[in-house]
Image: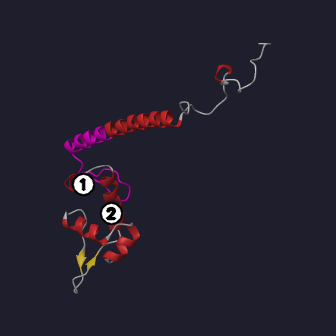
């Protein structure tokens, strides 16, 4: 398939596909007229590259990882080395730290939103306990029977 079709099928721009090829992440053959011809499996490869970029990996790390992955299912191939597995575990730990930082940032943002809007803190939906009934409406007397 030509580069335009690969771009359309993956949602990745032609310029990015050329960059992937330049970085050794993607391979193509050339027609006699000099046009790039990509095999069908290039679709899975481009999707995998995008997933690895989304995970925060850079192109040189992706170039190390790709030969160790099967494009069809993303599983490891026989070329995955213990050293690479250790590096990837480190990358996963980095992502976990980023997730924790984002959760803390969201909590701070929630507090600011609550303070700015005058709302009470968010609580999960569910039945309210008697002590969560809230204040009596203005102008009403508390229940004397209780």
Image quadrant in which you'd find residue 86: top left
Would you name the residue on which mark 1 appears? 62
Q: Which residues are magenta?
A: 68-95
Q: Is residue 59 left or right of residue 119?
A: left
Q: Mark 1 near mark 2, Cβ–Cβ under 8 Å? A: no
**88 part of magenta stretch:** yes
Would you name the residue on which mark 2 appears? 46
Q: Residue at x 43, y 34 (%)?
A: 107
Q: Nearer the viewer, residue 123 or 8?
A: 123
Report crowding for label 1: few under 14, some 14 to 19, many 20 or more residues within 10 A (C-alpha): some
Decide: is 127 above or below 56.
Answer: above
Q: Secondary structure at mark 2?
A: helix
Image quadrant in which you'd find residue 103: top left
Q: Nearer the viewer, residue 120 or 21?
A: 120
Q: Quadrant of the C terminus?
A: top right
Q: Residue at x 32, y 56 (%)?
A: 70
Decide: is 82 above or below 22.
Answer: above
């Amino acid at each position: 398939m030509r580069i335009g079709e690969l771009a359309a099928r993956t949602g990745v721009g032609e310029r990015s596909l050329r960059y992937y090829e330049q970085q050794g992440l993607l391979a193509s053959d050339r027609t006699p007229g000099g046009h790039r011809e990509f095999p069908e499996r290039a679709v899975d490869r481009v999707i995998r590259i995008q997933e690895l970029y989304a995970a925060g990996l850079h192109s040189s790390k992706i170039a190390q990882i790709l030969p160790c992955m099967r494009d069809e299912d993303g599983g490891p191939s026989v070329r995955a080395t213990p050293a690479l597995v250790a590096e990837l575990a480190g990358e996963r730990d980095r992502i976990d730290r980023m997730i924790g930082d984002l959760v803390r940032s969201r909590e701070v943002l929630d507090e600011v939103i609550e303070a700015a809007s005058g709302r009470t803190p968010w609580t999960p939906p569910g039945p309210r306990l008697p002590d969560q009934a809230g204040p009596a409406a203005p102008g009403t007397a508390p229940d004397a029977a209780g």
